[in-house]
Image: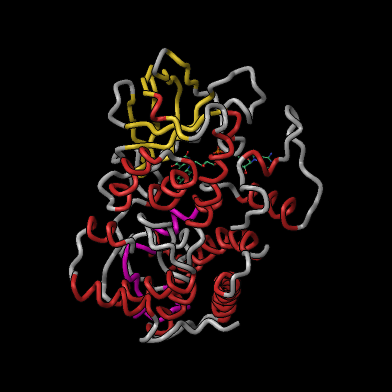
Amino acid sequence: MDLALPGDEHPARVAVRSWLAAHPDPSPRQLAESGYVAPHWPRPWGLGADAVDQLVIDEELRRAGVRRPFNQIGIGWAGPTLIHAGTDAQQARYLLPLLAGEEVWCQLFSEPGAGSDLAGLSTRAERDGDEWVVRGQKVWTSFAHIAALGILLARTDADAPKHRGISYFICPMDAPGVSVRPILDMTGDHAFNEVFLDDVRLSTDHLVGAENEGWALAKVTLGNERVSLSGEGSLWGQGPTAADLVDLVRRSGGVRDLRLRQDLARVWSEGEVLRLIRLRTVSAAMSGRAPGPEASVRKALADEHGQRVMEMAVRLAGTRALLAGAGPTDPGVDDAFSWPEEVWAKGYLFSRALTIGGGTAEVQRNIVAERVLGLPHDPDVEQGRSWAETRSLPDGAAV
Ligand SMILES: Cc1cc2nc3c(=O)[nH]c(=O)nc-3n(C[C@H](O)[C@H](O)[C@H](O)COP(=O)(O)OP(=O)(O)OC[C@H]3O[C@@H](n4cnc5c(N)ncnc54)[C@H](O)[C@@H]3O)c2cc1C
């Protein structure tokens, strides 16, 4: 597995360095127009970059301290769906502000009665002349309170089999009839919301793809979501890794308690295995091979690993972990060990969400069982559909 990135002469490296020399402090709009926000997207939105060029560009931006605009859902999974199925007019209207983070996007998919079984959703969109009238309720909608736009699934044919009567819309969050109510999570943060849609009128140019064929697009969105949540940090690709925790412990003088040492070593080893699985996937992509089953396995393992990293941090900190920002005085750990930031305390609480959002741990296992191991499908009682199809990936895709 050769993962050495190309050196100074590589064209993508030369290009990004010279662009950064001309734009030492780029605005979000400049970054979006340069193609460096999502270099793997096709031109003119991205650069059509292959895996090597993407890694080189990431490395150069990181080195220059340039951060991409925040728009996790927009850039991560709404944008790729619009590239896949949006009209030219939709792409021209939405993609640049999305890449620049000028219009934050949210995802209006889950409902009180439809999470894992997403195709069971009951929000309705009825045709009225040139408009659709949308009625229903969404829940757990991250960023709805700051979003300008949402990707929305609604049922447009109540008589069709449940996967066939769904359409995919773009919903302006300031449209009359959209109301957003906050839900505070257990970290105390306000990240997700309930969204009520009361006779929201959407013109036909808000429909993405064909009427009643939204389920295929939902699978494109969900496939991209899982890839986006599979980065290196232990909180859906963000935040510290197990190796960061070990470094912190080392810098603080180490752990004396033998049991803690052993458990810390186990968590670190898990993190290394996940890192190597990820590198193997990247290496396969770099040599032009499609991602193998290890990518699906990794997502199923990584969420629970993230929880174990955070649990380990709290165990190391002892009872003082209950105080965000406090340093631990556990007898197993040197006193110098302290919380570097509230990331560990918040991360511990947030980590409970890892095995729920983006497809639950059980859903991941169903995908691995059916798509990777080829085990028999878990039948959906009503429709005879595979369970993994109810909230899962395009056929053959692996995350
Ligand atoms: C932090 C966070 C952010 C989120 N952001 C968004 C967002 O922006 N937009 C959005 O649309 N949604 C969002 N969600 C919602 C998320 O997609 C759902 O929570 C998830 O799909 C699970 O659905 P549910 O909560 O309805 O649980 P349910 O589907 O009711 O599941 C409950 C439990 O039953 C298990 N289960 C259900 N059916 C089966 C089965 N057939 N076999 C085995 N086990 C089963 C599940 O694994 C789970 O453990 C977010 C969730 C979280 C935690």
Q: Quadrant of ligand 1?
A: top right
Picture quadrant of residue 164: top right
Which image quadrant is residue 88 in?
A: top left
Tell whether 288 sits left or right of 315. right
Q: In the rendered image, which quarter is residue 119 located in?
A: top right
- Tell me, yes or no, if residue 259 can be seen here: no
Instruction: Report x, y in % for residue 365.
Output: 68, 52
- Residue at the spot 49% in from the left edge and 56% down from the top edge: 229
Q: Nearer the viewer, residue 253 or 69?
A: 69
Can residue 177 be spotted in the picture?
yes
Q: How many marks?
A: 0
Q: Residue at x 54, y 24 (%)?
A: 155
- At 49% across and 41% down in the image, what residue appears? 85
- From the viewer's perspective, is residue 300 above or below residue 283? above
Q: Is residue 157 above or below residue 219?
A: above
Residue pushed farthest right?
376
x and y percent of residue 5 in the render?
Answer: 46, 82
Range of residues picked out in magenta = 330-352
Image position, residue 184 (x, y; %): 36, 40
| Magenta segment includes 83 | no
- Residue 9, above or below 27: below
